Image: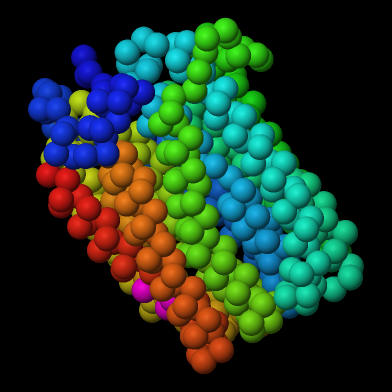
Amino acid sequence: MIRFINPSSPMDQTAAEDPASTPAPAKGPSARQSARRIFKNAGALVSGKAAGGVLSLAYLAIAARTLGPTDMGYLVLAHAYAMIIAGVARFQSWQAVIRFGAPMIAGDEPDRFRTLVRFAVKLDLLSAGAAILLALALARPAAAFFDWPDAVMPYVYVYCFVTPFLISATPTGVLRLFDRFRLLGWQQILMPGVRFVGAVALWIAGGGLEGFLAVWIAGVLLDGASFWLFGWRELARRGLLPAAHRAPGERADRAWLPFMVKTNIVSTIELARSHLPLALTGGILGSAASGFLQIAINLSNLIAHPTNMLNHATFPELSKIAAAQGARAMRKVAQRSVLTAAAIAAPIALAYCFFGEPLARLVGGPTFAPAGLLVGLMALAQLLRIASVVLESGVMALGRAGYALAAQAASASLTILLLLLALPAVGPAGAPTAIIAGWVVLIAAYAAALRRAG
């Protein structure tokens, strides 16, 4: 049986933060076996995400051909605005549920685990309230920056109230911790499925921008609600539902909040490579440019979706290996995962570089031909991202949230600086170029951290 370190004790916290104090490796699965388990779990997620990716391309094609670049730009900018607000307000409590919950479950500490879940849920609720207030406060300045027409604003305000449904961190962590990857995989179909059905209905009925905004909002609502339903059902099935009120003498561990604060800052900084480039492209170059970039993002997501699933499966596994066998064994598994994933994705990225314009025309129609160059560049960015997400999981598995924060900050600062310089100078192609540069810096920083770990 694998023995896990309990991060709630001061000595174990030190071990998590200082690789030099990691206990002597215990006997456990080999790097090859652990990597296989990571890819098995990732494969369970990809099975659903692949279907979701196809549906995403389909509904995007319908929206692009129905609305054209400008109105589609308004649509994707409204969603990007909501995602940015949610990203700023959200604590990455799912990482804490895995990081601290895995040893509790392995050590048969259900009461401590319930305390952890209740603490994480409280932070999610706090984040939800903060997200609504922040979204409402910034709606008008955002409208001026993005040049949203008056007809869009009612839907933007509705989007402000559904941002909490983009914050489902705790149930996500619960499902990943208990290896419910197949369920998570099929859950990935829900939002694109709702949008696809709604887009088809609007295409038949001749709906416009307002109708598409309503469908996008409905997708967010159902997607977020499903996470909480599945997560709570899993806790109930295992008898781990936390009580509504704190038991006498029950206290949160001092390590939980600092860890979540650090991961919140890391995820906020991560917006510099996810939704912020789309927002800055629309604000600086106009909504049509953001429409071109969104086509490229969705097409490259056929590479990114498996990458995301790899990240979801990697972090729990690397956390267990780091706790049971030490940093050196974990690093070997991370390296094997990076090389395998990159070898699989490289031919796809290369094909995107050669056939970017035909792919953009196929999805969006002739008016989206300018997105061809962006498709190839975004594919290269996703290839770099594969290495980054696995290495980040390794750094976080060692409890080095502070180091991850510094690395993310350096990478994000470079990305934002290049976005502000390159977008006015070279147009929409400046966005993926800046993203690529940011990934390179982040990979170098994470690789250096893991080398020093053992």
Q: Is residue 392 above or below residue 169?
A: below
Assign the magenta stretch its main secondary structure.
helix
Q: Is residue 168 left or right of residue 332?
A: right
Q: Residue at x 36, y 23 (%)?
A: 8
Q: Is residue 207 above or below residue 375?
A: above
Q: Where residue 171 sits in the image (x, y, percent)? A: 55, 30
Q: Where residue 242 sits in the image (x, y, percent)? A: 58, 15
Q: Quadrant of residue 109?
A: top left
**Image quarter (top left, top right, bottom left or bottom right) of the C terminus:** top left
Q: Where residue 154 sits in the image (x, y, percent)? A: 88, 59
What span is colored magenta in the figure? 433-437
Res 82 seen here? yes
Q: Quadrant of residue 127?
A: top right
Q: How many marks?
A: 0
Q: Residue at x 25, y 63 (%)?
A: 444
Q: Is residue 434 left or right of residue 171?
A: left
Residue 275 highlighted magenta (yes or no):
no
**Image quarter (top left, top right, bottom left or bottom right) of the N terminus:** top left
Q: Residue at x 47, y 10 (%)?
A: 111
Q: Is residue 75 above or below residue 39?
A: below
> Front-most of 402 and 379?
402
Q: Quadrant of residue 152?
A: bottom right
Q: Where residue 98 sits in the image (x, y, percent)? A: 41, 30
Res 98 seen here? no
